[in-house]
Amino acid sequence: MNYKNIEKKALLISSIVNGINAFAGIFIYIITGLNALLLDSVFSVIGLVSSIAAIYISKNSHKKTDNFPRGLYFLEPLFG
C-alpha cells in the first residue's frame, strides 16, 4: 500500500470521527446545557474542518497550473 492511500484513509477516518464527536457533543449539549461539552464540540468541529482542508490539499497538491508548473506542493507546509 502506498503512502497516498494510507494518508487518504487516515484523513477520512479522522474526519468521520471528528464529525461524530462534534454532532454528538452538540446534541448532548442541547440536552444538558453543559458548557464544557460545547467547548469540546467546538474543538471537534475545528478538527473536522481541518481534516476536510487536509483532504482537499492532499487531493490537489500534485496538480500543475500555469502559475505553479511543478505543482501546488506549497499548500502542504502552508497548511501545517
Image: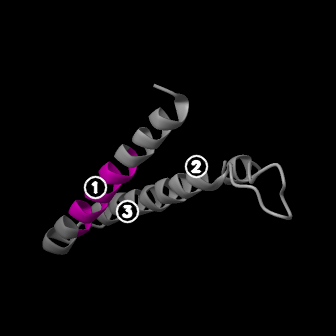
Vertical order, 55 against 6 (above or below): below
- On the image, the x and y values in percent for residue 48 come to 42, 58
The answer to which of marks 2 and 1 sits earlier in the sequence is 1
**Residue located at (54% from left, 59% from top):** 53
Q: Residue at x 31, y 49 (%)?
A: 17
Few, some or many C-alpha atoms within 10 Å of disc 2 (few <14, some 14-19, many ≥20)?
some
Q: x, y (%) of residue 8?
A: 46, 42
Snapshot quadrant of residue 63: bottom right
Q: How many marks?
A: 3
Residue 29 as seen in the image, left or right of residue 68: left
The three-letter code of the residue at mark 1 reads: Asn
Tell me if 69 is positioned left or right of 39 in this view: right
Q: Residues within 10 Å of mark 3 (few under 14, many from 20)?
A: some
**Which residues make up the magenta segment?**
14-26
Q: Disc 3 versus disc 2: distance between alpha carbons?
A: 28 Å
Which secondary structure lies at badge 3?
helix
The earlier-in-sequence mark between 1 and 3 is 1
Residue 56 falls in image quadrant: bottom right
Q: Amino acid at mark 3?
A: Leu
Mark sitting on residue 21 = 1
Residue 80 screen position, x and y as percent: 66, 48
Q: Which residue is mark 2?
A: 58
Alpha-carbon span between mark 2 and mark 1: 23 Å
Instruction: Kindly check if marks 1 and 3 are in contact, taking CB atoms under 8 A apart as contact.
Output: no
- Mark 3, residue position: 39
Q: Which mark's residue is nearer the viewer, 1 or 3?
A: 1
